[in-house]
Image (tube, rainbow, N blue to C red):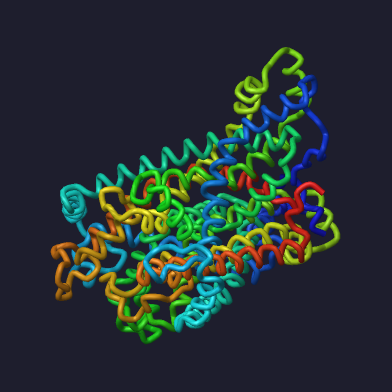
């Protein structure tokens, strides 16, 4: 089913030399010169930090001086023994459980609804959804604080109807996974809707016409034809959203305690695992444990991506 | 490409029936209502906060409480808010805005200069190590930038680049997604015969790239610039960790510091010691808009590139 998605590019076959007329070594030299700047940046800012973190995660910082390989697995143990470890992982687990399936389902549904009958109004709505993606990071936190304050929010009718009187009634430890989901969806959904919309547009007209002639209505076409055909893009979205959400930092960090935003008392200073890593490094001075935790988070994101790729046979560049 | 997927086998001459087919068609009346209900509900979800943010800049703290949340205050209040922001710490906001622009422009230039030649050569040439680079690109592409911030701090600390502008600019230059998109773009849209013909005419490899490949990549450049701009303009975690001199901050870290150091979000409360008073929500909202408006403009321009399928081509099923 997945191989039917239409305009996916035909990739050049491997091992087919194209530099006719140039000697072997010169061809390779030219290629390496083209790739050099990128390879250097990759080494310095992609692989370098990862490898250095690996080195540091086995180093000991307790004496104030770095002693490489002195800690063994001590830093990893310190992370697991940390009293906030399970707290932060339960938090992020709840957040992932809510935000990933809900985010993907709503994006796919909205893209389908927009695209099933294209027109000026649906284009306008798509643009509207898309532009809210301009609000992210600290500004998004600001907007959310305003939106969830029953005394000034444009949604105050809804909030008061649900029995909320103060911001602190709305923003509390238990509601954070839902609030972060709403924030992530607000900032990110428009972009994904546009991508899925593009994928839906690329479905060949003949396929849909054939279904129409066979008597399928608009809803049957969505369920039995369009959805199976955009499945690769849904998987792609899953991988990126999962890996990104595991790393949640900015929202809880700005919303959290000590920031004078009026909600600090209700939001734990350290809520997500990435905040715990930050805390290890800059509050406790234990860069070894910070590195170990960063690597654990990295492994979770990459591991999930790998499983999905293996499971779905997705992303196989050049068979 | 289907622009209209509602092809009906029979056309109806009666106007009312034609109207029915054009609006409701094969969705059914219930489906029609459900579809518009959901779409408009989410329109409110995405749009009302933006509208509120714009209107909030025109209202004083008491007006925010008393007036309708979507009412307009006065232009004078907007001007006042602007004045307060500009005067904050002797114009530090302008320094932050200038930093933001500098970081984004330099990061964009370096990333495009490195990822376009790389993606091009990966697409057209075969050389030892090519598969390794492609796989590492795929893997690093899936890594969220925030995953590397703490390790990056330690690495940059080692070479004494922490708390300099390069700590923000250089990491932004590594753009694996850009390399991957460029690779896919050239692999699928640059006919090898075109390059061979130019080689026969005596073009060098650099000339080929400069005179043939690069001009073909204009639509790609738009998409890459959009993604890169968007990521780096909003970059918070990196600068937050890697910079501690507030003269080096970009706008996202700046706004965080602004709301934390002033009474902007809680004008009615007794301030804690050290908090600067006299600031209201309008100032915070206007500061937010200063950050959001450039991105919103870029978003409006870039939307067609995203829909246009450059992304779609990047995912191989």
Q: Tell me which residue sits at (44%, 72%) in the image.
A: A276
Return the residue found at the far top.
B201
- Left or right: residue A233 versus residue A262 is right
So how many labels did they put on this image? 0
Quadrant location of residue A137? bottom left
Residue B40 in view in this figure: no
Quadrant location of residue B70? bottom left
The image position of residue A54, as x and y in percent, is 55, 61
- Left or right: residue A167 versus residue B157 is left
Which quarter shows the N terminus of chain A?
bottom right
The image position of residue B133, as x and y in percent, is 67, 45
Return the residue found at the far right.
A214
Asked if residue B53 is positioned above or below residue A14 in the image, the reply reads below
- Left or right: residue B112 versus residue B202 is left
Asked if residue A196 is positioned above or below residue B105 in the image, the reply reads below
In depth, the one of A302 and B303 nearer the eye is: A302
In depth, the one of B73 and A302 nearer the eye is: A302
Q: Tell me which residue sits at (46%, 53%) in the image.
A: B155
The image position of residue A263, as x and y in percent, is 31, 76
Q: Tell me which residue sits at (17%, 52%) in the image.
A: B89
Q: Tell me which residue sits at (25%, 58%) in the image.
A: B57
The image position of residue B299, as x and y in percent, is 47, 47
Asked if residue A87 is positioned above or below residue A233 in the image, the reply reads below
In depth, the one of A57 and A164 nearer the eye is: A57
Residue A65 in view in this figure: yes
């Amino acid at each position: 089913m997945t191989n039917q998605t239409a305009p996916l590019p035909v990739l050049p076959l491997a091992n087919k030399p194209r530099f006719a007329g140039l000697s072997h070594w010169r061809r390779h030299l030219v290629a390496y010169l083209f790739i050099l700047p990128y390879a250097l940046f990759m080494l310095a800012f992609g692989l370098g930090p990862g490898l250095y973190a690996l080195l540091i995660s086995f180093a000991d910082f307790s004496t104030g001086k770095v002693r490489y390989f002195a800690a063994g697995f001590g830093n990893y143990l310190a992370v697991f023994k940390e009293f906030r470890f399970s707290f932060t992982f339960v938090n992020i687990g709840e957040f992932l459980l809510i935000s990933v399936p809900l985010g993907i389902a709503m994006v796919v549904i909205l893209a389908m609804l927009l695209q099933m009958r294209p027109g000026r109004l649906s284009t306008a709505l798509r643009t509207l959804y898309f532009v809210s993606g301009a609000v992210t990071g600290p500004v998004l936190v600001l907007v959310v604080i305003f939106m969830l304050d029953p005394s000034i929010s444009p949604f105050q009718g809804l909030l008061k109807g649900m029995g909320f009187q103060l911001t602190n009634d709305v923003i509390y430890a238990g509601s954070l996974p839902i609030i972060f989901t709403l924030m992530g969806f607000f900032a990110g959904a428009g972009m994904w809707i546009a991508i899925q919309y593009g994928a839906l547009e690329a479905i060949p007209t003949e396929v849909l016409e054939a279904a129409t002639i066979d008597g399928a209505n608009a809803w049957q076409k969505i369920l039995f034809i369009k959805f199976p055909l955009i499945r690769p893009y849904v998987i792609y979205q899953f991988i990126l959203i999962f890996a990104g959400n595991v790393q949640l930092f900015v929202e809880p960090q700005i919303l959290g305690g000590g920031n004078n935003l009026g909600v600090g008392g209700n939001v734990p200073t350290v809520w997500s695992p990435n905040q715990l890593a930050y805390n290890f490094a800059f509050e406790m001075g234990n860069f070894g444990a910070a590195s170990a935790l960063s690597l654990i988070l990295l492994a979770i994101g990459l591991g999930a991506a790998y499983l999905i790729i293996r499971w779905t046979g997705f992303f196989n560049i050049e068979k | 490409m289907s622009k209209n997927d509602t092809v009906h086998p029979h056309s109806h001459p009666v106007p009312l029936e034609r109207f029915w087919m054009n609006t409701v068609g094969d969705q059914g009346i219930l489906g029609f209502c459900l579809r518009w209900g959901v779409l408009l509900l989410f329109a409110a979800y995405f749009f009302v906060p933006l509208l509120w943010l714009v209107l909030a800049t025109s209202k004083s703290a008491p007006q925010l409480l008393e007036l309708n949340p979507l009412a307009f205050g006065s232009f004078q209040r907007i001007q006042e808010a602007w004045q307060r922001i500009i005067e904050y710490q002797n114009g530090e906001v302008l320094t932050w805005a200038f930093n933001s622009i500098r970081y984004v422009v330099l990061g964009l230039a370096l990333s495009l200069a490195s990822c376009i030649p790389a993606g091009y050569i990966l697409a057209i040439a075969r050389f030892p190590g090519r598969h390794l680079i492609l796989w590492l690109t795929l893997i690093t592409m899936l890594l969220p930038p925030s995953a590397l911030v703490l390790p990056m701090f330690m690495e940059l600390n080692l070479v004494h680049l922490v708390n300099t502008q390069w700590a923000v600019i250089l990491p932004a230059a590594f753009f694996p997604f850009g390399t991957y998109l460029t690779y896919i773009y050239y692999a699928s849209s640059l006919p090898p015969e075109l390059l061979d013909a130019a080689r026969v005419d005596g073009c060098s490899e650099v000339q080929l790239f400069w005179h043939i490949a690069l001009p073909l990549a204009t639509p790609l450049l738009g998409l890459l610039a959009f993604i890169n701009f968007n990521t780096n303009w909003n970059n918070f975690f990196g600068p937050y960790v890697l910079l501690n001199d507030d003269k080096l901050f970009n706008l996202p870290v700046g706004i965080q510091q602004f709301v934390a150091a002033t009474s902007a979000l809680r004008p009615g409360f007794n301030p804690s010691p050290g908090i600067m008073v006299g600031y209201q929500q309008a100032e915070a909202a206007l500061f937010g808009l200063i950050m959001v408006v450039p991105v919103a403009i870029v978003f409006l321009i870039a939307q067609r590139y995203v829909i246009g399928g450059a992304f779609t081509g990047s995912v191989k099923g």
